[in-house]
Amino acid sequence: MKKFVNDPKQFVPEMLEGLALANPETLKYVPEYNLIMRADGPDQNKVSIVQGSGSGHEPAHVMIVGKGMLDAACPGDVFAAPPFDYVYETTKMMASPKGVLLLVNNYTGDKMVFDMAQEMSSAEGIQVRTLFINDDVSVEDSTYTIGRRGVAGNFFVIKAVAAAAERGADLDEVIRIGEKVNSVTRSMGVALTACTPPAKGSPLFELGEDEIEIGVGIHGEPGRRRAAMMSANEIVEEMLTPIVQDLPFGDGDRVALMINGLGGTPISELYLLYGQAHKRLAEQGISVGRSYVGEYCTSLDMAGASITLVKLDDEIESLLRDPAEIPMRVF
Amino acid sequence: MKKFVNDPKQFVPEMLEGLALANPETLKYVPEYNLIMRADGPDQNKVSIVQGSGSGHEPAHVMIVGKGMLDAACPGDVFAAPPFDYVYETTKMMASPKGVLLLVNNYTGDKMVFDMAQEMSSAEGIQVRTLFINDDVSVEDSTYTIGRRGVAGNFFVIKAVAAAAERGADLDEVIRIGEKVNSVTRSMGVALTACTPPAKGSPLFELGEDEIEIGVGIHGEPGRRRAAMMSANEIVEEMLTPIVQDLPFGDGDRVALMINGLGGTPISELYLLYGQAHKRLAEQGISVGRSYVGEYCTSLDMAGASITLVKLDDEIESLLRDPAEIPMRVF
Amino acid sequence: MTATDLADVEYVVRTLAQTAVDKEKEFGDLDAVVGDGDLGYSLARGFEKVLQDWESFKRDDVPTFLQQIALAISSRIGGTSGPLWGTAFLRASAAAKTVDTIDGAAAVSMLRAAAEGMMARGGASLGDKTLLDALVPATDELERQLAADAGAAECRAAFAKTVRECADATSTLEAKRGRASYSGERSIGSPDAGAVAIAIMIERITEGWDQR
Amino acid sequence: MTATDLADVEYVVRTLAQTAVDKEKEFGDLDAVVGDGDLGYSLARGFEKVLQDWESFKRDDVPTFLQQIALAISSRIGGTSGPLWGTAFLRASAAAKTVDTIDGAAAVSMLRAAAEGMMARGGASLGDKTLLDALVPATDELERQLAADAGAAECRAAFAKTVRECADATSTLEAKRGRASYSGERSIGSPDAGAVAIAIMIERITEGWDQR
Ligand SMILES: Nc1ncnc2c1ncn2[C@@H]1O[C@H](COP(=O)(O)OP(=O)(O)O)[C@@H](O)[C@H]1O
Ligand SMILES: Nc1ncnc2c1ncn2[C@@H]1O[C@H](COP(=O)(O)OP(=O)(O)O)[C@@H](O)[C@H]1O
Ligand SMILES: [Mg+2]
Ligand SMILES: [Mg+2]
Ligand SMILES: [Mg+2]
Ligand SMILES: [Mg+2]
C-alpha cells in the first residue's frame, strides 16, 4: 500500500484536523466525537441537518458541512458506522428548538446506531427524526443492508433538506422534502479497481486485470455481476438502463444528472461519461436540468464511477439551486 | 488498463464534448481546435486570458473556463502541446481590443507553439503577449523543459490575472500581476504511482511497490530522486522544505497553501497532508491566509500530491478573493 | 422497588461484564469460525468500560442504572454488538420502569423487552442464527417455570439449561444476520457465537448466584 | 521579384514536401535509433498537407507563399518539428520580404533567417546534434562559394555536399535537444535524424534542379 498516511488508526482524526485547519472561519472540529460542525452552529432558528456514516467517502460528508448544506457530520472510522456516543452527543450538541434531522445512508450498522440515537435523544426531549437514503438500484438486500443501499444520491437529499431548513421549514416539512427527493433519486455504480483501506493496507476485494464490478457498493461490496472490461459507452449503458427503468424515468422528464467519481478516476473520464449519459438520456426524451460531475461520494481510492438521476420538479430544482458554502473552493 | 474510454484517440474530444454538454449556458466548445471558451466571450472590454497545455491535467485548464477565470483553453492531446493552429486560431477568436494574454506552463513543446502563435498573431495586428509559469522547484532543466517546469501554481497566476482583467486592467498591468504572482509561487510534487495515458494503455514509468518519486513532474517526468515509501508527515517535509527554502518563505509571511491531488489520491489524504503542512508552516512563523485542497492540476490517474505556496500581499490576496464562476459546482 | 432488587441487578450486570472481559479470546474464536472474529473484542471493550465506570453509575433505581449501562456499552462497541446490546439494556430499563419489584415476572418482561428491542434494532427473526435463538426460548422456558410455580433456583437452572441447549442447537441453522451471514451455508455446522456467548454468561450468573 | 523566383521557390518547397512524404519510413527509422521514431510521421503529415493544399496557396509573391507553407506545416505537426519547421518558413518569408530578387545572396539570408528562427524557437546551439549542425555549416559554405564567385551549379553542389558531410558528422555528437537527448551518451555513434533528413531533401533538390 502506498498512501499518504501516518498511523492508520489516526487517519480519520488527522484528516478532520486538516479539514478544520483549512477552514478555521467556517468549521469547528470536536475530536472526541469525530465531529465537524459549522463554527456558528447550531442555529436556533432552523432545523439542524446532521449526516453520519463511515469515513472513506470524502468529500461525503465532513467536507460538505457549511451554510446551506450540513450543520454537522460525525463519521466513524473508514467504512465503519460511527460509534453510538458520537451520534448521540452530536445530536445533543446540534439540538435546536426546531429539531434535528439525522440523515443516514441505509446500511445495517449505521441504521442501528442512528435508530438508537434517535430513541435516546427523543427520550431526553430532543425533537429528532431520522431519514434513511436508499438510492442504489443495483441490488436489494446486500452485504451490509436490508433493503437498498444509500450512495451518492444522498447529496441531493442533503441539499434539498438543507435549503428547506435554511428557508425556515419546520421538521415535518423538511422530512417531507427529504422523503420526496429520496423517492425520485436513483443511482448505480461500477468499479474498475478495488479500494485499499489504510488500516488494511491491501485491496478490499479481488478484481481481475480485465474485470469490472457492475453495481458495486461504496464499500466495495459486490453488485450485480462481474463483467469483462468494456468501452465507456457500454459502461454508461450498464448503469443508465437499470436506473432509468427503475423509477422509471421517461419521455418529457427533466432530471439532475450526476457523474460521481469513486476516488481513483480522473475527472476527464467523468466528463467523458457525462457526455455519453447526457446524449443517451436526450435520445429518450429526458433532458438534463442540472449537471454534477466530480467526486461526491467516493470509496477511498477506487477507480470507478456512479451515475445518479433525480427527477426534477419546480420545488426540487429551486431547492437545489439555493446557495451553499462548503469547503470545496471554486478557486 | 481499465479506464472509462472508448477510442483513445477520441478521449480528449469526448471529454470536451461532455464538459460543454454539462455547461450549456456558460461554455462553448469548438471541436476543430479543442477549444473551450466562455459562451459569452470574447468580452471586448477586457483582456482575454487564454491557457494552453496538454490534456490529462484536468480540471486544468478546460474546466476552469468561466467568468473570473479563463476566457478560453485550447488543450492538445493527452500530455501533448496543442498543435500550432489550435493556439493560433484560438488567439484570433479571443482577440479583444484590450489584448490577449496567453498563459503557458514552461515546457519546451508548449513554449515553441505559443511563441510562434504570438509571433504570427502579432504580425496580424493582434495585441498578444505570452507569460510562462515556472513554479516547480524540484528540478532546473528537465525532461521537457529548459528552466523550471510550470505545475499547479499556475492556478494562482490564472486567478490573479483573470481577476485583474475582469476589473479592467490593461494588458501591461495584467502581465505585471501575472509575473508578480509567478515570482512568489513555488511548488513541488511527489508520485506514489505512475499514471497511465489512455492511448498507451500501460503505466508511463516504472515505480516499485515501495518506491515514490520525489519532485515528480505532471507528465510523470523524473524529479529529484526515488525514495522508499515513507510516512505522510515525512513526505510533507520532503516537499515543504525545498519550497520554503527556495523563495525563501519566512517568519511573518502570510501564504496561500495548496495541496493538489495528482488524480488518483482521495481528498481525505489531501486534507491529512494539509493539516501537517499547515502546522509545520506555523512552527516557522508562516501563516496560511488562504487554503486550497483538492485536485487542480493532475496527472491523469497518478496517485500523489503537490504542495504550492504563494507569498501573499494585499494586492494578490484581494485578487484571489474575487469571485469566479467555473464548472466545478459547489453543490 | 427495594435495595435488594438493585443489588441483584448489579450482580447480573457485573457478571455479564466480567465474563465478557474474561472470555474475550474464547468469544473471538467462536466468532472466527464463520464470522469475522471480532465478537470477543467488541464485548470486552464495551463491558470493560462498564467495569471501569462501575462506581460512578447513578443507582437511584434499577431503570436509571440500566440506562447508564446501555450508554457505556454502546459508546465503546462498534459494529453490530454495540447498538444491539445497548438497545437490550435500554429496553430492559424501560420495562423495569413499569414494575414495582424485580421479581421473576419482572425478569421475564425485561428479558422479553430486551429481545424485542434487539429484533427491532437488528431486524433479525427467530431462526436467523443469532443470540435471539438462545435468549427467546430460554425466556419462554423461564415464564413456563414461573407459571408452574417452580422455585427460584429451579427457574434459574431451567433458564440456564435452555439457553445452553438452544445455543448449541443453532449449529443446524444458516446465519442470516451479522457478518456470519456472509458465509451463507458454510455457517451450518457450528453454533452462533453470540448465542454461545450468552449461554456462557448466563451459566456464570446461575453458578455464582448463591455466593453473590 | 520575378515569376522565375517564385517558380524556383515552388520547386524547392515541392521537392522538400515530396521527399518528406516519400521517405516517411526512412526518416522514422532514423529517428528510432536513439529518438522516439516519430520524425517521419510528423514531417510526412505536415508536408502532405502542403501537397494537398498546393493549388490553393496564394502566389502574390514569395513571402506570401512561404508564410502559407509555414501555417500549413505547423498546423499538422505536433511535437518539436511543427513549430521548428513552421518558424523556419516564417522567417525565410520575412527575409524574402527584404530582397528584390531571390538570388544566391537572398537564398543565404533566407537560410540564415530560417536557422536563426529555429535556434530562437527551440533553444538549440550548434553542437547540440540537431539539423542545425548540418544546415548552418552548409549555409556558411554556400556563402563562401558565392563570395568566391562560383557558378550556380557549383554553389548547389557544394551546399549539398556540405550538408551531407555535416549530417553524417553529427554521429560524434551527443544529443542535447529533442527526444533523442533523453538517450544521453547513447546518442553518440549514430547521426542526427533531422540532419540526415535535411541532407536527403537537399540532395533531391540539387539532383532535380535542371529538370525542374
Ligand atoms: N441483526 C442481528 N440481530 C441480532 N443479533 C445479531 C444480529 N447480527 C449479529 N447478531 C449477533 O451478534 C453476533 C456477532 O456479533 P459481532 O461479532 O459483534 O457482530 P458482527 O457480525 O457485525 O461482526 C452474532 O453471533 C449474533 O449472535
Ligand atoms: N530544440 C531543437 N532545435 C532544433 N532542432 C531540433 C530541436 N529538437 C529536435 N530537433 C531536430 O528535430 C529532430 C527530431 O524531430 P522530431 O522527431 O519531430 O522531434 P522530437 O524530438 O520531439 O520527437 C531531431 O533529429 C533534430 O534534428
Ligand atoms: Mg464485525
Ligand atoms: Mg463479528
Ligand atoms: Mg522524434
Ligand atoms: Mg516526438
Image (cartoon, coloured by chain):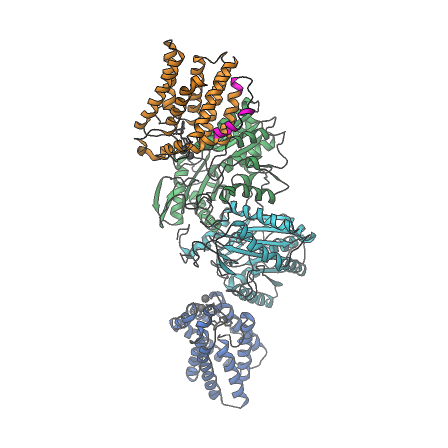
Chain colours: A cyan, B green, C blue, D orange
**Residue C5 in view, yes or no:** yes
Q: Residue at x 40, y 39 (%)?
A: B221
Magenta segment: does it hold B306?
Answer: no
Magenta segment: does it hold D49?
Answer: yes
Q: Nearer the viewer, residue B143 or A98?
A: B143
Q: Quadrant of ligand 5?
A: top left
Q: Which residues are magenta?
A: D46-64
Q: Nearer the viewer, residue B198 or D62?
A: D62
Q: Residue at x 53, y 25 (%)?
A: D54
In the rendered structure, the answer to whether residue C52 lies left or right of residue D64 reads left
Q: Position of residue B72 (x, y in %)?
A: 57, 35
Q: Nearer the viewer, residue A259 or B13?
A: B13
Height in image: B264 above or below D204?
below
Height in image: B118 above or below A80?
above
In the rendered structure, the answer to whether residue B191 lies left or right of residue B14 reads left
Instruction: Find residue A210 and report its image quarter.
Output: bottom left
Instruction: Report the number of discs.
Output: 0
